[in-house]
Image (tube, coloured by chain):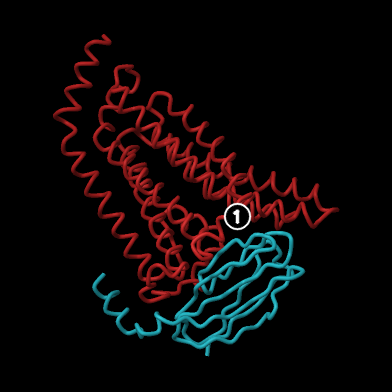
Chain colours: A red, B cyan
Amino acid sequence: MLATAIIIFREVLEAALIIGILAAATREIKNSRRWLVAGVLVGLTGSALVAGSTDFIGQLADGIGQELFNAIVLGVAVSMLAWHNIWMSSHGAALAANASALGRDIRDGQSECSALFLIVGLAVLREGSESVLFLYGIAATDEGGQSGMWLGGLFGVLGGSAVGYGIYAGLLRLPVRWFFTTTGVLVLLLAASMASQAAHFLIQADLLPSLAAPLWDTSAVLSEQSALGMLLHTLIGYDSRPAGMQLIFYIAALVTIGIGMRMAGKNRHKPSGEKTASKKLLTI
Amino acid sequence: MKHILLISLLFPVASYAENDIYSLIIKDHQFQPSEIKVPSGKKVKLLIENQDATPEEFESHSLNREKVIAGKSKATIYIGPLSPGRYSFEGEFNAKTAQGVIIAQ
C-alpha cells in the first residue's frame, strides 16, 4: 500500500503543483475557476483514453511514439504557459488595480481561460495516464491487494493535492505588490522546466543529440527521489543528471518568454491601460 | 552555452550513425537478462519486450531514462554514450522483482 501511495503521490504532486500555481495566478480572472475544473475533468478522461492506447501510441513512429507524444504535449503546455505569462505582463497591473471591477476585456479573458484549460488538462493527462496504467497493473495481478491499492491510491492523491493546495494558499497570502512578480517567475520556471523535459524525451527517442550527458551529476548531493529534489524537479526543473541539450532548451525558454514578458509589460500603460480605465468609468 | 557546444565536439560524432542493439525481456515482472554489458562511449539502442499482460515502466535514475511499456508489447529506448560504470534500472510498477543493471565498459 505504501509503495502505491508513493508512486501515485509523485504523479499527482507534479500536476497539483502546476494547478496550484496557475489557480493562484489566475484568481482575478472571471470564470477561471470553472475553466480550471473543466481542465481537470477533461484531463482525467483523457488519462484513461491515453492509458488505454499506450500500446498503440508506443508503436507509432518506430517505437518512439510515446516520447513524441510526451514532447508534443509538453511543447503545447510550454507555449500556453508562455502565452499566459505574456498576457499577465500586459494585464496584471490592470487586474490588480481594479480587482473587484467587472469591466475587463472579456474576449482577452476568455482566451486566457482557454490557455488555463489546456495547461491544466495536459498536466492532468500526462501524470494521470501513468497512474491509471500503474493501478491497472496492480488490479490485474494482485487479487488480494486491491483494497490496499485503493487506499494507497487515495492517500497518494490526497497527499499530492494537499501540497498543491498548500502552494496555492501560500501564494494568495502574498501582498499584492509581490504577488504578480512571484507567480510570473514561478510560471516562467515551470515553462522552462517543461521545455527541458521535452528535450529529454526527444533525446531518449534519438531525435536530438544529448550534447554531453550528463552535464553534471549531483545525484549524491540532491537526489530527485528525495522530497526536496521532487519538489524542485517540478518547480524549477531540477535534474540531477541533465543532458547539455536540456539546459539549452531550458535557457532558450527562459530567455524567449522573459523577452516577451518585458515587451508586453512596456506596452501595458498605453493601450490596455486606457481601455480598462474607460471601462472602469463606465461601470461607475 | 558555447562551452556546451564545445564539450559536445569531444564526443565521436560518427558513433551517432550506428546504434548497437541490445534486447531485454520482461517476464513474470523480471528482466531477462538482468545484466547487460554494453560498450562505453557509444550510443546504444535497447529493445525491451514486455511479455507480461500488465504494463511496466522501465526506469533508471542513473541513465536518466523512463518509459512505460504496455503489456504484451515492445519498446525502444536509446541510451548513452555512457562512461564506463554500472547503471542500475528497474521496473517501477514492480520494483520488488524487476531489477537489472547495465554495465558499460
Q: Amino acid at mark 1?
A: Thr
> What residue occupies the far right of the structure in this picture?
A144
> What residue occupies the far left of the structure in this picture?
A270
Residue A185 vertical position relative to residue A217 in the rendered view, above or below: above
Question: Which residue occupies the foreground of this view, B16 or A15?
Answer: B16
Q: Position of residue A240 (x, y in %)?
A: 46, 68
Q: Is residue A53 left or right of residue A215?
A: right
Work out which quarter of the rendered image holds the C terminus of chain A and state it. Answer: top left
At horizontal 46% and vertical 39% (from top left) the residue drawn is: A170
Residue A130 vertical position relative to residue A169 in the rendered view, above or below: below
Q: Is residue A156 left or right of residue A13?
A: right
Work out which quarter of the rendered image holds the N terminus of chain A and state it. Answer: bottom right
Label 1 crowd bin: few (<14), some (14–19), many (20+), radius 10 Å: many
At horizontal 69% and vertical 74% (from top left) the residue drawn is: B31
At horizontal 53% and vertical 70% (from top left) the residue drawn is: B77
Count of marks, rendered view? 1
Q: Position of residue A273 (x, y in %)?
A: 19, 26
Question: Which residue occupies the foreground of this view, A199 or B86?
Answer: A199
Q: Is residue A2 left or right of residue A198?
A: right
Q: Position of residue B60 (x, y in %)?
A: 57, 70
- Which residue has dot 1 on it? A54
Q: Position of residue A73 (x, y in %)?
A: 45, 50
Chain of the residue where label 1 is placed in the rendered structure = A
Residue A223 vertical position relative to residue A181 in the rendered view, above or below: below
Label 1: element kind: helix
